[in-house]
Each structure stands twice: as C-alpha cells, then as structure tokens.
Image (cartoon, rainbow, N blue to C red):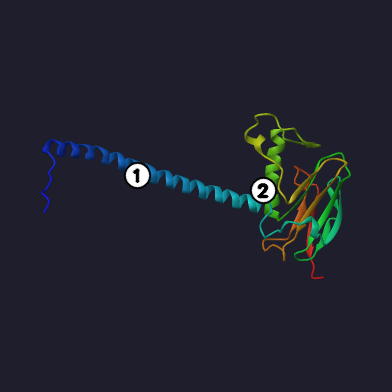
Amino acid sequence: MFPKRTMPRAMTAAGVAIFMAVLPMNARASEAGAGMSGHMEAESSHMGGEAMHEDDHAGGSKVIGRPGDPSKVDEVIRVDLSSYAFSPDSIKVRPGETIRFVLTNKTDLLHEFNIGTSPMHAEHRKEMLEMMQSGMLTPTGMAPASPGASGAGMMKHDDPNSQLVDPGTTRELVWQFPTKQPENGPLLFSCNIPGHAAAGMTGTFTFTSG
C-alpha cells in the first residue's frame, strides 16, 4: 500500500480560510447570474408581448387579414378620397380574397385609408391625434423628421393595413381578407386623421359568398 500523504496543518488552515472566503463570492455570483437570467427572461417576455401587440395593431392577425401578395390579386377596386368621404363607402369582399385598392386623394388635405375593427380605429385615432399635437402630422402631410427626435417624434405611420394619401396623389394597398367577419364587429375602412371620421369619412366591408 502507498503511504498516506498528509497536508501540513498550517496549509490546511489557509486552504480552509481561502475556501470560506471564496464561497460567499461564488454564491453572490450565482445569485447575480440567476437574477440576470430572470431579468433577461422577463425582458424577452416583455418584448414578445410588444411584438404580439404590434402584430395585432398592424393588422397582421387573422382577425382582419394580412398584407396581400401583389402577384396574386383577385380584384382591383378604386376608391376616391374626397372631402370627408370615401367613394364607394361600402365594398363587397369574398372571404379570403386579395384586393388591390387604388386610392386617389381628390382634395388638398391629407387622408388615410385604414382597414380595421371599431376598437382598432378608435385606438389609432388617439395615436394620430398625438402625432398631430406633436407636430409630426399636419393637415396636408407628414412633417419631416427632425434629427435626434425622441418621444412622440419616434412614432411612425407604417402599419401595413393603412395608407396615407397625400393631396392630389394616388397610392395602393394590397390586402388579403380573412375568411369571415371579425367576431367583435364589422370590418371597416376609415380615415383616422383627427376630425375626418367624425365628419363621415368611414366605410364598411361586406362579406359575400359569391
């Protein structure tokens, strides 16, 4: 048998002292790591929630449809945007079809064509009001973004279910409709620039079987 090796008492005591000093540090590091992991998980969950909210607000959910494939358009519908009115103000759609909307603004004011439900339009009108109050939005167009803008200046009007149409111009929006009307109310189109919907600039989509 090999002789048993022993460590001098002084060295053993020093080793114990080092071990006891390192242990709390390791524990703190472990706690900090767990805290950081939890923070990252919470942050990830928060970001995921925001992404879901943005997806719903942007019209990416199945409730109101999705951006359509321009190469697979089933129908082209022309919509004139006049002074606080759409023409036509009622549009028939087939479940699941893709429509290219050709939007012509015949006025000297900025208008919007936005697809959504009543709650979505109500929420968007609040945002548009904030944009106008901040100076980002004017009665005739979007104000140029200033360098280093923050807060309200970071807001954008880039939802895929919406199109801003400058005075005297024509824009297009390609949209694939859902297979049925949303359960929380009819699918509508609206101009959510402050005061325009209240003046009558709204319209309704009617789902047909043929």
Horizontal placement of 132 versus 21: left or right?
right
Residue 159: give x, y in percent of width and height. 71, 48
Horizontal placement of 148 versus 4: left or right?
right
- In which quadrant of the rendered view does residue 89 lie? bottom right
Q: In 3D space, how far apart are the residues under numbered discs 1 and 2 (Cα atoms)?
A: 44 Å
Q: Amino acid at mark 2?
A: Glu
Residue 6: give x, y in percent of width and height. 12, 44
The numbered mark, 1 or 2, whose residue comes first in the sequence reads 1
Q: Is residue 136 above or below residue 112?
A: above
Dot 1 and dot 2 residues touching (CB under 8 Å): no
- In which quadrant of the rendered view does residue 98 lie? bottom right
- Which label was assigned to residue 2? none
Horizontal placement of 83 versus 36: left or right?
right
Residue at 69 percent across and 34 percent down: it is 134
Residue 210: give x, y in percent of width and height. 82, 70
Which dot, 1 or 2, sits closer to the camera?
A: 1
Residue at 84 percent across and 60 percent down: it is 75
Q: Residue furthest bottom?
A: 209
Q: Is residue 11 above or below residue 4?
A: above
Horizontal placement of 16 versus 202: left or right?
left
Helix, strand or loop at label 2? It is helix
Q: Residues within 10 Å of mark 2 (few under 14, many from 20)?
A: few
Residue at 72 percent across and 37 percent down: it is 132
- Which label was assigned to residue 123? 2
Which residue does the numbered mark 1 point to in the structure image?
Answer: 30
Q: Residue furthest top?
A: 147
Residue 186: give x, y in percent of width and height. 73, 60
Q: Residue furthest front?
A: 1
Q: Amino acid at mark 1?
A: Ser
